[in-house]
């Protein structure tokens, strides 16, 4: 959807949020980008969940000679 149509949606979105008990929040683009990068950073630095399946065990890229994560899992 083109961004120029966003303002016309605001009343509908506010009503939907009110009906479902969800907070309506409007942030600027820079704040959204910062929040997304912060979330990605936090996920990247999070400790692994005990018992979660391993990742990158056998992928096309992990079979390459010199792959950085070969044998790291």
Image (cartoon, grey):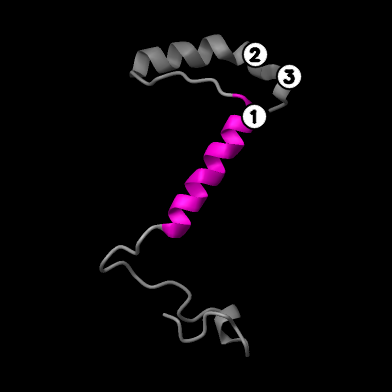
Discs 3, 1 touching: Cβ within 8 Å: no
Q: Badge 1: how crowded within 10 Å, few (<14), some, or many (20+)?
A: few
Q: Residue at x 41, y 80 (%)?
A: 73
Left or right relative to 25: residue 10: right
Identify the image quadrant of residue 18: top left
48 relative to 8, above or below: below
Residue segment shown in magenta: 28-45
Q: Which residue is mark 3?
A: 4
The N terminus, quarter of image: top right
Q: Which residue is mark 2?
A: 7
> Could you tell me how far apart the alpha carbons at marks 1 and 2 are, in whole angstroms?
15 Å
71 relative to 29, above or below: below
Residue 32 magenta-drawn?
Answer: yes
- Outermost residue to the left: 51
- x%, y% of residue 52? 31, 67
- The label on residue 29 is 1
């Amino acid at each position: 959807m083109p961004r120029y149509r966003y303002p016309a949606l605001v009343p509908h979105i506010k009503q939907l949020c009110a009906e479902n008990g969800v907070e309506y929040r409007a942030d600027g683009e820079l704040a959204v980008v910062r929040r997304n990068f912060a979330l990605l950073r936090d996920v990247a630095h999070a400790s692994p969940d005990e018992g979660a399946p391993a990742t990158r065990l056998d992928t096309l890229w992990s079979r390459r000679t010199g792959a950085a994560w070969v044998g790291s899992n």
